[in-house]
Image: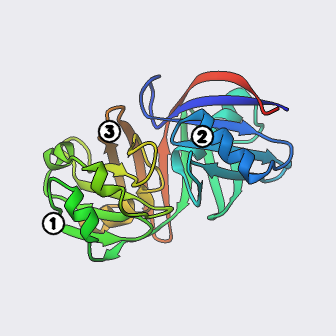
Amino acid sequence: MKLTLYQIDAFTEEIFRGNPACVVPLESWLPDETLLNIAKENAVAETAFFIDNGKEIQLRWFTPEFEMDLCGHATLATAHCLVSILNYPHNEILFETKSGQLKVTFKEDTYYLDFPSRMPVSSELPEIIARSLNIQPKEVLQSRDFVLVYDTEEDIKNIKIDQSIFNQINLDPGGVVVTSKGADSDFVSRFFTPQASILEDPVTGSAHCSLVPFWAERLGKDELSAVQLSERQGKLFCKNQKERVIIAGKAKTYLIGHIWTE
């Protein structure tokens, strides 16, 4: 079976920046084992598979290890694939996903993701995560992910993870996001996933479902600029809307190719 594959850098205006995702259109769902094997072979943080049924688009996300419940950068990459390559005729896309219906709108060269809000609540940090960190957080919260709050952007830049300790915990499907106020943005973050082939995710849209409501409340503003401080970095423009968050960004196509599954 021959499938088309698109690799797209999300949350960036430049190639080799932001977060790479693979996007694979399907006519019908393949076995989950095949989808997971394709994601493993692609060896990027997320591979998105979609089926366009004419009205709504069914969308699923796979890491090289498991299926995710929500992924921002691969959703943005899928929208970019539809709009910029496959000539999708509308400026609003409705995706049916494990996290419900997600809407993406497109204006000029920016994609606006309408995602569920996941306000984190106070929590206790598991000992394994604490021992894996070289700098301890000032606050610990949790929604899907653990949200660790620090004093400064320099703290976030200087955080190191002892992966041999970190990998002793399984947070499937979540991870650990570290965050602080930003020097040149409203807030910054980094994201780490234990027991994953890619320890640090370059740009994590889904983590901002928690970061946006948290920082909106903490800073007293609903429109926020964010930077994820990975090596590749990424820029996100966010809006807090009570039960929903808007996460906006740009994307660049890197590769178009084919997969042969047999």
Label 3 sits on a secondary structure element that is loop
Labels 3 and 2 touching (C-beta < 8 A):
no
Residue 253 position in % (x across, y down): 58, 25
Q: Which image quadrant is residue 138 in?
A: bottom left
Kindly identify which numbered label has been placed on residue 230: 3
Residue under pointer 2: 40
Amino acid type of the residue that numbered disc 1 sits on in the rendered structure? Lys
Amino acid type of the residue that numbered disc 3 sits on in the rendered structure? Ser
Q: Residue at x 70, y 51 (%)?
A: 59
* Label 2 vs 1, first from the N-terminus: 2
Residue under pointer 1: 138
Label 2 sits on a secondary structure element that is helix
Q: Eyeballing the image, is 56 above or below 126? A: above
Using residue 128 as the reference point, say whether residue 46 is left or right of it. Answer: right
Q: CA distance from mark 3 to mark 2?
A: 22 Å
Q: Residue at x 14, y 51 (%)?
A: 152
Q: Residue at x 33, y 43 (%)?
A: 228
